[in-house]
Amino acid sequence: MNYDVLIEKAQEAMENAYVKYSNFKVGAALLTRSGKVYTGCNVENSSFGATICAERVAFTKAISEGEREFEAIAVASSLKGFTYPCGICRQFMSEWGLDIKLITKSGDEVRVHTIGELLPEAFVEF
Ligand code: THU
């Protein structure tokens, strides 16, 4: 799938974000190796630590439907600059493959990183 399409799906998913506390919407669109897309948005909670980021929502939706092989995840937010995943999401995503691509956009520039690049020396197995 074209990464521009994946970014658009992340932007659409962002609209469903439940952001009562931060008012900062994030959307994610996760592409499986078989070509299916699972979207996610951040879902906040009055107990702030219970908040779930858009990336982990997309992954948990896919994993709970039986998906195990992932190609790429696009992330979108209202930031003017690039949106990058938090540390918890980097660790969470590393479980599913350091070669998964993270797509982020600012203006007309699209950046593609692997999760491995975003989490150097990752702890993946024990
Ligand atoms: N957030 C995400 O959903 N993904 C990110 O990559 C960074 C942060 C959310 C969590 C919280 O709802 C809000 O953004 C502010 O941190």
Image (tube, rainbow, N blue to C red):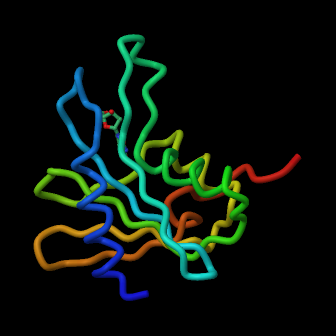
Residue at (26%, 51%) from the top-left corner? Answer: 14
Residue at (25%, 60%) from the top-left corner? Answer: 12
Residue at (23%, 42%) from the top-left corner? Answer: 25
Ligand 1 visible in quadrant:
top left
Which quarter of the rendered picture does the N terminus lie within?
bottom left
Residue farthest toward the bottom in the current orientation of the protein: 2
The correct choice, above or below, for 16 with respect to 105 in the image is above
Residue at (53%, 50%) from the top-left corner? Answer: 90
Residue farthest toward the front in the current orientation of the protein: 65
Write down the quadrant of residue 95 in the picture: bottom right
- Residue 115 coordinates in the image, percent (x, y): 55, 64
The correct choice, above or below, for 115 with respect to 93 in the image is below
Name the residue nearer the viewer: 74 or 37: 37
Asked whether, in this view, residue 83 is left or right of residue 99, the answer is: left
- Residue 8 coordinates in the image, percent (x, y): 25, 71
The correct choice, above or below, for 14 with respect to 36 in the image is above
Residue farthest toward the top in the current orientation of the protein: 47
